[in-house]
Amino acid sequence: MNLLLVNPQEIDDQGCVLLTDRRHQHIIDIHRLSLGATLQAGVLNGLCGEAEIIEQQANATRIKLNLYRKPPAALPVTLLLALPRPRMLARSLEHLATLGVKKIILLQTARVEKSYWQSPELKLEKIHQHLMLGLEQAKDTLLPEVVCKQLFKPFVEDELSALAINSLKLVAHPGDYPACPRGISEQLTLAIGPEGGFVDFEIKLLEAQGFQPVQMGERILRVETAVTALLARLF
């Protein structure tokens, strides 16, 4: 926990927060901080700064916030991600939040097992938990938006044009395509398929919306590896 995150609703009139959950335990067991110590803190979707420990007991820590700086800049990307298998989804969400992606659209594609949508990892509280862990790692406060789309064709044909307007449109896909570009500086809409890739029909639908297929070589990467490699290369 590189950044202690609090919700605005937790802050009292004096700018203080009483912690009784895992954050309290982390301060005690991992940071090993005591009365008068400070640590980096931030308010969810708000400013960052410091928190001073002003009261500490066995089951609670009270902190006072001093917030004065903005969080890191977000990556200018909207990510279309074929829904990974549940365990991989958890890791991917944490990685994406750490990297600064703020809009994530999870898609059903031809090679995505429909049973994945029944996973507990897609419950709102679990998604929130993984995103929060990613923000804490990156010292960020801006919570990403995660949207689920289980009908690929209607989403691409009816919604994607407006979503990706005025952006560079790329789809990562193995094959004889141009190499993925490096160091772009414009708004991007990036589509990443499952480990087996998009099927030809899906690629054609994306191309009809102006998406350019790009590749990163012959190796087939796991989803969380592909996400990290592509974003590092692109930005």
Image (cartoon, rainbow, N blue to C red):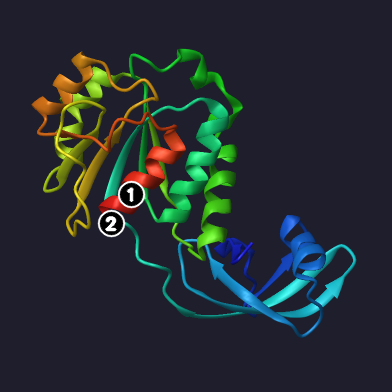
**Which quadrant of the rendered structure holds the C terminus?**
bottom left
User: Which quarter of the figure has residue 145?
Assistant: top left
Check the image and report above or below for 103 versus 8.
above
Q: Are marks 1 and 2 in contact (CB under 8 Å)?
A: yes
Q: Secondary structure at mark 2?
A: loop
- State the CA–CA distance, disc 1 to disc 2: 6 Å
Of residues 96 and 127, which is closer to you in this image?
96
Q: Amino acid at mark 2?
A: Phe
Q: Secondary structure at mark 1?
A: helix
Residue with the most extreme bottom position:
36
User: Which quarter of the figure has residue 8?
Assistant: bottom right
**Dot 1, how many residues are within 10 Å of its Cα: few (below 14), some (14-19), or many (20+)?**
some
**Dot 2, how many residues are within 10 Å of its Cα: few (below 14), some (14-19), or many (20+)?**
some
Q: Could you tell whether 186 is left or right of 57 in the image?
A: left
Query: Which residue is the site of mark 2?
Result: 235
Residue at 44% across, 32% down: 222
Q: Tell me residue 75's x, y (percent).
A: 32, 57
Residue at 79% across, 70% down: 61
Residue at 38% across, 38% down: 226
Q: Could you tell whether 208 is left or right of 131 in the image?
A: left
Q: Which mark is residue 189?
A: none
Of residues 151 and 221, which is closer to you in this image?
221
Q: Which mark is residue 231?
A: 1
**Which quadrant of the rendered structure holds the N terminus?**
bottom right
User: Which quarter of the figure has residue 9?
Assistant: bottom right
Residue at 45% across, 38% down: 224
Q: Could you tell whether 185 is left or right of 78 in the image?
A: left
Q: Tell me residue 98's x, y (percent).
A: 47, 55
Check the image and report above or below for 164 versus 3.
above
Q: Amino acid at mark 1?
A: Leu
Residue with the most extreme front position:
218
